[in-house]
Structure formats: C-alpha cells, structure tokens
Image (tube, rainbow, N blue to C red):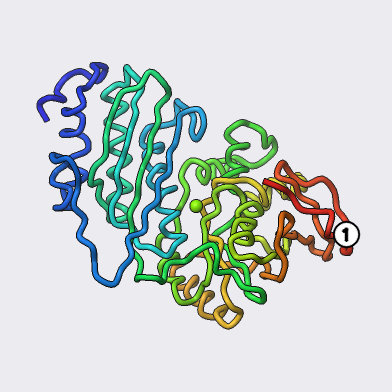
Amino acid sequence: MSAMAGGDDDPPDEFGLIAELFAPLAAGYPGALGLTDDAAFIAAAPGFDTVATMDAMVAGVHFLPDDPPDLIARKLVRVNLSDLAAKGAVPAVVMLAAAFPCGTTRSWLRAFAHGLRRDLDHYGIALIGGDTVSTPGPLTLTLTALGQVATGRGLLRSGARPGHDIWVSGSIGDAALGLKAIRGELPGLADGHLAALADRYRLPCPRTGLGPRLIGLALSGMDISDGLVQDLGHICRASGVAAEVDAAVVPLSAAAAAAVKDDQSLLALVLTGGDDYELLFSAPPEAADAILILAKELGVPATRIGRVIDGGGADAVTVRGGDGQVLAIEREGWRHFRGPDDKGAGGWSD
Ligand SMILES: [Mg+2]
C-alpha cells in the first residue's frame, strides 16, 4: 500500500499498483492468494464445466481514450460476462491483463480500479490474477472470465433446429444508435432518448440472470456483439440451418423506436449494429410459455423474433418486413425492398 503513496500524477510502480488497487479485488477468493503468487488456484466443482472467455478492448478501437476510466473498466467486465451468460454459465472469477500507456496517472488508475470493484461486487465475482505492464502504445485491456455450467449443459451456437423459435432478450439496436447519439448524429431526438441510447452504448447490461436459467429451455445461444443479423448468421452456420426474422417484432426501446420513427432508414442500423450484448437464442415452441414466465420473473424482456428453418449457406438469414416482403440487408445497412419471391438475391455477407 505504502508503495502507492504519492501524488496523483506520479507514475506508479507495478507492485504498488497491484497491492493498492487490485489485491483488494481478490480478497474474497482464497485461491487468488492475495495476488501475491505466480498463479491462482481454482477449485473445480464436481459435475460442472468451467467456461472460459476472453475479450480485449483497445483505446481508440473499442472505446474512446477520454472515456471515463470507471466506465471503461465496467464495460470490460460486462462484455465478458455477456459471453458467459450466452453459454448459460454463472460467472465466478476474472483475470486482467492491462497494458497502461506510459504516463498513466494514479487518479486515472484509481478511477479504473473503482469501476472494476463496483462491477465485480455487483456480479459477485473476484479478480484472481493477471498482469500489468506499461506500453508506448494505446491503453489495451484484456479480461479473461471464468464461469460454471453443469457438465455438458452449456448453450452452444450449434444447437438451433428447424421449427424452433428465435428469441432475443431486452431491446435491440440501442448501442449502435447510442454511438450515433454520442457523435451528435441524431439531431431532433429528445435529450432523454439521446441519454438513454448513449448509456446503452457505454454500459451494456449482460444478461447474467437470464442466461443460466435458459438451460433446459433454449437449445442454442450466443450474445449479440456484432449485430443481430450477423450474429444470427453465426448460429445458422454453426447449426447448419437458416432463419427468418420478422423485423416488425424485433423489440425496440422507447428511444430507439423514436429514432426509427424519425428516420426509417435507421431500422437497418438497429438490425445490423453491434454492442447490444443481449442474448440471442433458439428454443422449441413448447418452451415458449416457460420462457415468457421466466422473463417476467426476472424482469428481462424476451421476445420471439422469428424461426429456424431448413437451409444454410451465406444467405442463411432472411429478414421480412411487416408485409412479408424480404428486406435486402447488407452489413452496412439495407439497400432496398424486394418482393416476397425474390429472397434468393437478398442477404449479406460478413
Ligand atoms: Mg459473444
């Protein structure tokens, strides 16, 4: 601790940094050994798989260099927990590899650690190890998250079957619209809506409660990080199936609905934009009632947006408008409407 005493602008040393800011985050996990050893020890629970995921975030790529450090830390935690939730896993521990630019100040680091602690506490998980280095390059943060799921029961991308329903949690498109809001590209939208969308971009809400409860109901799952259409394509390819989505029932927040009402072309961004971190899953029709009851119990909306069908290939995902017309969507946005029989030429690639 004493090694960190000093002014907020003095460069910290690595061991002082760990002792003051990160060791307290490991206090609740005996196997972390107070971050004083070479590695952490994780007790393996019989009957469970350990599920591991890792996401990296780079300043200027995944967040803005001047974003608030506490929010950067919390987003780092949340995008990783979203991946665990998508597998139906309950999060347990995380490991952090952080490359801080030379000259990073103590006050910045304290705010970062504060944000980290806030979300680790919120989700009931511990930091059990990692590494901190300095870099001449941009701030680069890598988090590994480990969780648990009953052996063999985790949700895979490959479990979608024809005839099953496609579901999403929460609302879709807020984060992509939020980035536009932050950039001032949604003129005319009410301040409350702009703030709501920006919040959804800066601080996703991983569905850590819903994911594990979908075990036994859903047969495939992933989280939406690259956009609904593209990510549903990942499920289709992994499962060897195709999918149809009804654009009219894709759930929108009040703010997103207002934005789309102002500018219909934004619906393409809603369907293809990334960073939502909602769950995308498929389930047999007979599970629908139980899923809706579960969603109500958890206070997390779940919406059936389409169905799994036979097919596959590059154009596995078809999006239909309210009148049944196929919406020709490309990754950048949609081009134009096509007739209901013109599906073969639509689609997108990634
Ligand atoms: Mg994912």
Nearer the observer, 192 or 299: 299
Taking the image as shown, residue 316 lies to the left or right of residue 1, namely right
- According to the picture, the residue beneath numbered tag 1 turns out to be 342
Q: Position of residue 137 (x, y in %)?
A: 41, 21
Q: Secondary structure at mark 1?
A: loop
Q: Is residue 29 above or below residue 158?
A: above
- With respect to residue 106, does 308 lie above or below? below
User: Is any atom of residue 254 visible in this view?
Assistant: no
- Place residue 253 in its image quadrant: bottom right
Q: Is residue 137 left or right of residue 192?
A: left
Q: Nearer the viewer, residue 138 or 199?
A: 138
Q: Residues within 10 Å of mark 1 (few under 14, many from 20)?
A: few
Furthest toward the left, the residue is 2
Q: Quadrant of residue 240?
A: bottom right
- Percent position of residue 263, x then y: 76, 44
Quadrant into which the N terminus falls: top left
Q: Is residue 25 visible?
A: yes
Task: Find residue 204 and report its horizontal and vertical position in percent.
Answer: 47, 48
Name which quarter of the figure residue 194 lies in: top right
